[in-house]
Image: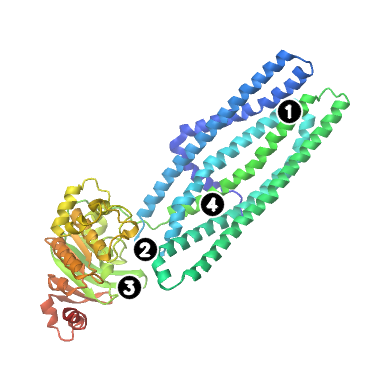
Amino acid sequence: MKAFDLSLFKKILQYAKPYQSRLRWVVFWSLLLALVSVVRPLLLKETIDSALEQKNEAALFWLIAFMGTFLVLEVLSQYFFVYWANWLGQDIVKDLREMLFAKINRFKVAFFDKASVGQLVTRTVSDIEAIARIFSQGLFMIISDLLKMIAVLGVMFYMNWKLSWIVVLFMPLIVYATRIFQIKMKGAFEEVRTHVANLNVFVQERLSGMKVVQMFHREEQELENFKKINHQHRKSWVKTVWYNSIFFPIADGISNFTLGGIVLYGGLMILKGDPVSSPGDLFAYTMFIGMLYNPLRQIADKFNELQMGMIAAKRVFEVMEESEPIQNQGTLNPSLTGQVTFEHVWFAYKEPEFVIKDLNLQIKPGEKIAIVGATGAGKSTIIHLINRFYEVQKGKILLDNEPIENYDLPSLRKQIGMVLQDVFLFSDTILNNITLGNKKISLEEVMEAAKKIGIHDFIQELPEQYHFHVRERGAMLSLGQRQLISFLRVYVAQPKILILDEATSSIDTHTEELIQHATEVLTENRTSIIIAHRLATIMHADRILVMEKGSIVEEGTHDSLLKIENGFYKNLYESQFLKEMEL
């Protein structure tokens, strides 16, 4: 296993290009910090050899004043270095997080069918934050420490090359230990990131499905499952703790042995009257050893941060480089009339299991069609294909006689409104859930639209009315109320094509009447494709399509389809819709 992936590191550095000036400031403060750091031991040497040995009081005060000045300069350099490095890191991850989220927004729906929401959350939040530490705690800290070590070694050899060789002899030991530590920690951190993602996935899924957990009395079982995953997470972290507990005592031991060697050899030289060594040298060297070995030890610690960031970056780039985005090469941005055409369309979520087979269909502008059929017949797939949530394998879909791929994707979807069976509301106000942040839609326009649809009175009865906060997934509203909000959301957008997965089951009669009225208002003078669940909708449709195993087996009006003996629609009508009428 490589301890450091240079190609991945270069890829990360590409994101620092917009911040070249700030990067130069970080390098400047790093260099200044390295140079200023080595001055204090030299001043200490002069204080002992020149001021104390010669009992020069004036020199003592001047040297102490110089030490204080350089100490302040060192503190300021450290402050600006850390500040600019962290600032740079946060700006880079801000850009990277926005790019990642934008990329996720462009993925095909098929990607989310197989991707874990918990893992994507981990990539977008905690993994991205770990990348920030590459710049704030890893890369620049390591560079700063290396510069400081180079400056210290240079000054040490200039002062006393004999004492310096003792330091150099011990250095390969700590360098080798650091290298082994880096390799072991990389593997350990990969395990940590994997188990963090597993924890996020597990917790996210159980919190989302808490009703199911409690309904089937799964609390104890899920707790046991969580304990197992949490145990693996703890085990991987303990491994990193174990490596740290071995490495740092070894590094401290080598540093102390080096210091002992310096004091012993330097002391013997002084006792023998060797003019090359002085008491000031020994004092300076005790500081230099700490300045040399502590950064070397800290480099290993900073390398931990760098490794964590690199592993997180690898996981983020896996998503960034995923080849799932919908290709948006279309340039057309006209106002649609609403004509929809399917020509010999074949589609499979997973080939060769086609759910749409050689489908031919033409919907006229302003026409209202209802699609009926058994579960799995392909009804919902048709509405997904019109929105380009999925791409067809064969055939083509035309809007206003133009292939759907020729339209600019955002402009296309702005002209298609969808009310799905599974209504999703964000944790926000009713108003924001209706406008979805579109500043061009005013509260007055929303209220007027709500009156036309017939749900203004229902909203007025809520606390804070249009500013009522619905909480996560609209938990503060009933199923029927959430559905009504989704109708209003589509209506204010004024789409040219309406796709309605009419779901009115499990709601009270009054809400059903509101939804029925909203449907009538929404479909008026608008191309409408309705997956019908209620007889009232079917009977008012201009045309009914009956689907079976991915194909249209019958089409016509309600009355004409009932005349077909042993027909699919007639059987469906007698088995389902007649019972509905009786109820």
* Disc number placed over residue 311 in the picture, else none: 4
Q: Nearer the viewer, mark 1 or mark 4?
A: 1
Quarter of the rendering containing residue 455:
bottom left
The spot of residue 265 in percent (x, y) is 83, 33
* Disc number placed over residue 110 in the picture, else none: 2
Spatial separation of the CA atoms under disc 2 and disc 3:
15 Å
Q: Nearer the viewer, mark 3 or mark 4?
A: 4
Where, quadrant-wise, is the N terminus in this rendering? bottom right
Q: Secondary structure at mark 4?
A: helix
Q: Earlier in the sequence, mark 4 or mark 2?
A: 2
* Disc number placed over residue 284 in the picture, else none: 1
Where, quadrant-wise, is the C terminus in this rendering? bottom left
Question: Contact, CB < 8 Å: mark 3 with mark 4?
Answer: no
> Relative to residue 303, is residue 261 drawn left or right?
right
Q: Is residue 274 above or below residue 246?
A: above
Q: Earlier in the sequence, mark 1 or mark 3?
A: 1
The spot of residue 71 in percent (x, y) is 62, 26
**Amino acid type indicated by mark 4:** Ile
Q: Earlier in the sequence, mark 2 or mark 3?
A: 2
**What residue lies at 20% left-to-right and 55% top-to-bottom?**
460
Q: Residues within 10 Å of mark 1 (few under 14, many from 20)?
A: many
Residues 405 and 445: in front is: 445
